[in-house]
Amino acid sequence: MKTILNYQIQVLPKLNVTQIGWLLDHFDPAFVFYDWENATLKLCLGAVAECFPAASQRQNQFVTVEKWYQELKQQLKLKNSGPVPLVVGSFLFDPLQNKSATWSKLARGYFFLPQLTIYQTAEQTVAVSCASDSVTCQQQLLQLQQLLGSAVTTTESVGLINVTETQIAAWQRAVQTAITAIQTKQLEKVVLARMITAGLTTRLTAAEIWQRLAPIKQQNYQFLLKYREQIFISLTPEKLVEFQPEQIRLDALAGTIERGTQKEQTQLLGQQLLQSTKNRQEHQIVVSAITNRLTQLKLAVKHPTEPQILVTGSVQHLYTPITAKGKFDPLNILARLHPTPALGGQPQQAALEFIRKYEGWERGLFGGPTGWLDFAGKGKFVVAIRSALLDGQRAHLFAGAGIVAASDYHQETVETQNKMQPMLNLLKGKNKYE
């Protein structure tokens, strides 16, 4: 006899940053996702069920989650109205990369069906409690109310001790090797990423991280995933895909320049970006690849002919919004899209093989799809860039650069450093981009 999953809905007062942090500290696993496009927040606490996407190399990680998701869906009877349960988590960038100790507990990726999901919009805050029986659902809602009533502010006392990067010379050589491979037509584009490690004065809690992360609203999606004390965070400008009934929305985001200290300087730099042959080429590779993959799935694809400028915290990007209509399976779409040339390269497999050979470290969740999918078929996944992994008194920070024939390793070094700056500022306790 199959297990039946129940869920109950309860309206709550609006949660503040302190309460959200308090709950993040009291539950493991925990996940919070802020969507800047519609100013909504999803807070997911505790696990009814778990899935490790890359638990076996014999099965595609998206297929693993699809099977798990469908099994859960069969156990749920959805109500006629109101919010519904969802699954949340992160896929690996590339399960076939050589493994390292860095990701340890999150090395297989991680998804979970939350015991409690809090949906917060400008209009209302609603909690969804999910369990195998209605009594447990009620108990979870009662526990939530008690925790919210006892929330206190966490003191921000953690700072940086040092920042180290042992492989910068090797990374720059890899960039030069990539440029040569592209100029000799072995590749069209490849994204090479850097990792730096920061020592912390003491362990940074999820609550302290969220207190630093939450005020940053500059056209970035924010998320925090906590699992067995490892915490993965991101300030990403890049939406991979948003699922709506018979329609999906995507971002093509590639081509980067710094932002200015004044509005006029930022606009001038943005015009330089629009006129840059190198960046326009890099961007068009991404647009074409996404469009082709969606067209192969028999979807009707539309996008503007010219890119726009998207200004984020420390940099600005070329940006093209893409929409596609038709019937689709969300996890199959993810499998076909990931990785786009914005984080992998083109051709896809050749770029992945180049990254495995020359990058020299395990990306883990960096660059992988992270987000949520509910049981009514709606969902959103972002690309986990501008991110960091916190593990005890260490923080690993990640950023990548798209390499094309006209790239220069000096410029790519500066670009990746600019992309890491928001996370460095966050670890220093600064809420502004400086």
Image (spheres, grey):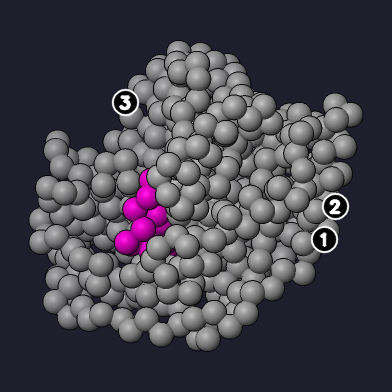
Rendered position, 132 above or below 227? above
In percent of the image, x 67 and y 40: which residue is there?
Answer: 402
263 sits to left or right of 142: right
**Numbered disc in front, either 2 or 3:** 2
Which label belongs to residue 413?
none
Q: Residues within 10 Å of mark 1 (few under 14, many from 20)?
A: few
Confirm whether the magenta stretch covers residue 218: yes
In percent of the image, x 37 and y 75: which residue is there?
Answer: 208
Tell me whether the residue at label 3 lies in contact with that at label 1, contact meaning CB atoms closer than 8 angstroms: no
352 sits to left or right of 392: right
Q: Return the residue at label 2.
A: 173
Q: Nearer the viewer, residue 130 or 100?
A: 100
Q: Amino acid at mark 3?
A: Pro
Q: Amino acid at mark 1?
A: Ala
Confirm whether the magenta stretch covers residue 241: no
Q: Return the residue at label 1.
A: 169
Coordinates of residue 128 in the picture (x, y in percent):
21, 54
Tell me whether the residue at label 2 lies in contact with that at label 1, contact meaning CB atoms closer than 8 angstroms: yes
Coordinates of residue 28 in the picture (x, y in percent):
39, 70
Which label belongs to residue 245?
3
Per the model, the C-alpha gap separating discs 3 and 1 is 48 Å
Q: Amino acid at mark 2?
A: Arg
Q: Earlier in the sequence, mark 2 or mark 3?
A: 2
Q: Which residues are magenta?
A: 213-225
Q: Nearer the viewer, residue 210 or 328?
A: 210
In percent of the image, x 58 and y 83: which residue is there?
Answer: 161
Q: Secondary structure at mark 1?
A: helix
Per the model, the C-alpha gap separating discs 2 and 3 is 46 Å
In percent of the image, x 40 and y 28: which residue is there?
Answer: 249
Q: Secondary structure at mark 2?
A: helix
Q: Residues within 10 Å of mark 3 (few under 14, many from 20)?
A: few
